[in-house]
Amino acid sequence: MSTPSTKTLDHIVHLTPPGSVNEVSRQFRDLGFHVLPGGIHAGGLTENALVILQDGAYLELISFTHPASHYPPGSPERQKRDANPWAWKEPGWIDYAFLGSSSTSISELINARAKKDKSRIRYEPEVDGGRERSDGKVLKWRNSAPSQDDDRGVAPFFCGDVTPREWRVPLDPPSNAEHPSGVLGVAYVRILVEDNDLSHMKANITSVVGRSPVSNTPRRATWVLDTPRTDVPGGKPRLIISVPETADERWTLKERGEGIYEVAFLVSSGMKAGQAWTPYGKIVWLKG
């Protein structure tokens, strides 16, 4: 059996305040994205909407269904909500996922690779997850995330489908991935880290991806990723890990901590390039 890839970008997670999925869906439509309804995750704590891209990756627009105060202190529901890895995150780009496997333990694969590389990254064993779509179809998958909380959102988690991926990411009809802005796919995901963390994060991501960065300087490193679909125009997405370079980036790192700073998208020829700030994160459009 061939070793599964550990460098396929699956989706990028964007968090907004509790109960705001409809509002953030409108905001992303105003930015030129076609937004699809998602559903409520197993356990009922979170719900989402999706922006599916032609490269097969997608944006997950997620929010908690209720604020923490909705659940009685000490109740099982409150304990589950407080234990969620995103419960204490500030709204914005908070995490990203690579495509996992339903038949192979990605956590064991990466942990063995990291041990050999002598990098610090370790992944938790896979756990079951799922969601019920708005049409009633039940989706199932297995997730594995970094063991250390400090690595979550800097290194990816992995999502491996048990039910068909096309149930989770409906690329049919093709109009699901057609956007007024002309967006085709992800150009890059850029992550900010502290200066003293850059060296070991380079080592961690190298163990996760399974390859050295294609570009490596004292202030940033870049890896080339794959996407679920390869038959779309434009280049492959990049994962960039860097230290802050501007006053705004230094302020963001101080206020939000290490994690995704900006997401850039390729747009079709003839469409407008540029950048925008949503209420909770930075978006860049690049011509393909």
Image (tube, helix red, strand yellow):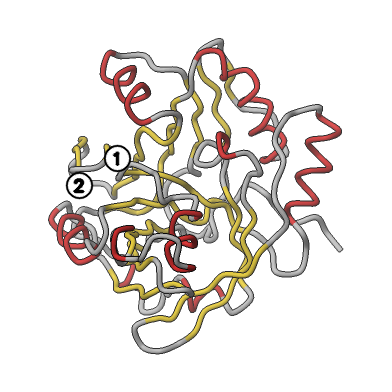
**Residue reaching furthest bottom?**
136
Residue 263 falls left or right of residue 151: left
Q: Nearer the viewer, residue 62 or 287?
A: 62
Q: Quadrant of the N terminus?
A: bottom right
* Residue type marked 1: Lys
Q: Is mark 2 on a helix, strand or loop?
A: loop
Position in image of residue 31 (x %, y %): 17, 51
What's the mark number on residue 271? 2
Position in image of residue 32 (x %, y %): 18, 55
Position in image of residue 230 (x %, y %): 53, 57
Rendered image quadrant of residue 114: top right
**Residue reaching furthest left?**
30
The residue where tag 1 is placed is 287
Q: Tell me, yes or no, whether the two marked residues, 2 and 1, touch with CB atoms within 8 Å.
A: yes
Q: Which of 244 and 189 is in front in this view?
A: 244
Query: What residue lies at 43% left-to-right and 38% top-to-bottom?
Result: 189
Query: What residue lies at 72% left-to-right and 41% top-to-bottom?
Result: 122
Q: Which of marks 2 and 1 is nearer the N terminus?
A: 2
Vertical order, 67 against 247 (above or below): below
Q: Nearer the viewer, residue 146 or 263?
A: 146
Residue 44 falls left or right of residue 165: left
Q: Distance from label 2 to label 1 (Cα)?
A: 7 Å
Q: How many marks?
A: 2
Rendered image quadrant of residue 51: bottom left
Q: In which quarter of the image is the C terminus?
A: top left
Q: Is mark 1 on a helix, strand or loop?
A: strand
